Amino acid sequence: MTNKNIQPNPFKSLFHIIAFILLFLVEQIPLSILTLTKANLGKNYDAYIRIAPIISLVLMAIAGTILFLVFRRAQQFDTIPFSGKTWLTVLAGIILAMLVNYGLLPFMRAQNSNVDALNTLGQNSQAILIFSVLVISPIFEEVLFRGILMNWFFPNRPIISILISGIVFGFAHAPISNDTDWIYALSKILLGVILATVYYRTKNIKADISVHFLNNFLSIVLAI
């Protein structure tokens, strides 16, 4: 992300790894509040469904503030304003993203842990689900996996930084286990690589947020 010849600092790298893990947990907590079911809570479910969306929204605001402040300190270059070239990169990104999604879709399982969590979230609050998919996820995930990760790890080695961003993004959506859907994981890794490339080429976090938003929006529209 920068041409500076930065010497690696093991202590700083360790700090960034720990901080990134903590930021990932911060990003995950707001929606995890809404992944409990009636089977889990029994007679307490009605009270939970009234208060949980409010708690989730408050936590989103807190998490978003933390991520934004860290991103502002992490980014090692000045943001380049949108231009015609930026929009062409966004267009290329969304085309590639849709090709990956629909090229690999026939080989994916119908269900996986990420899809199951989204289904549970939708059953508890359809409004929060839509808000999350179209607004929160594109912003939070791009700030975390592109804006922070790519500026903290190998910022002067873009290919490595892009690949790490894609791999971490992929396995954040499809954690490794005995039941991992590897085609789904591959689709998320490739999507992460596309989004990271958009961020690297445009030097504007809003560009990859736009691609992420359009990817999610078109996936919903085409699924209707």
Image (tube, rainbow, N blue to C red):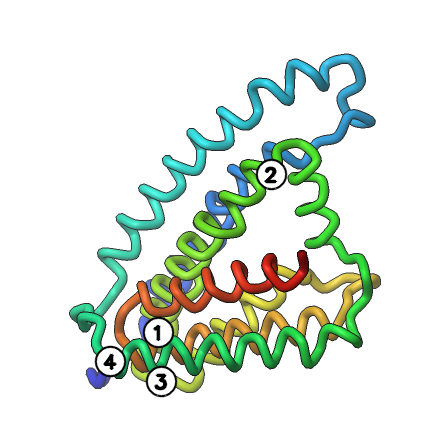
| CA gap, disc 1 and disc 2 | 28 Å
Q: Are marks 1 and 2 in contact (CB under 8 Å)?
A: no
- Can you identify the residue that label 3 sits on? 157
Q: Earlier in the sequence, mark 4 or mark 2?
A: 2
Q: Are marks 2 and 3 in contact (CB under 8 Å)?
A: no
Can you say whether 34 is above or below 44 in the image?
below
Image position, residue 186 (x, y; %): 66, 76
- Can you identify the residue that label 4 sits on? 84
| CA gap, disc 1 and disc 3 | 14 Å
Q: Tell me, for residue 199, which label it has, or none.
A: 1
Q: Earlier in the sequence, mark 2 or mark 3?
A: 2
In this view, the residue in front, 153 or 59, is 59
In this view, the residue in front, 59 or 148, is 59
Q: Nearer the viewer, mark 4 or mark 2?
A: 4
Going 39% across and 68% down the picture, which residue do you hit? 208
Q: Secondary structure at mark 2?
A: helix
Q: Earlier in the sequence, mark 1 or mark 2?
A: 2
- Can you identify the residue that label 2 sits on? 32
Q: Nearer the viewer, mark 1 or mark 3?
A: 1
Name the quadrant containing residue 142: bottom left
Q: Earlier in the sequence, mark 4 or mark 3?
A: 4
**Quarter of the image where the C terminus is located:** bottom right
In this view, the residue in front, 148 or 188, is 188
Going 80% across and 57% down the picture, which residue do you hit? 111
Dot 4, crowdedness within 10 Å: few (<14), some or many (≥20)? few
Q: Nearer the viewer, mark 1 or mark 4?
A: 4
Q: Amino acid at mark 1?
A: Tyr
Q: Amino acid at mark 2?
A: Ser
| CA gap, disc 1 and disc 4 | 15 Å
Question: Image check: 160 left or right of 75?
Answer: right
**Quarter of the image where the N terminus is located:** bottom left
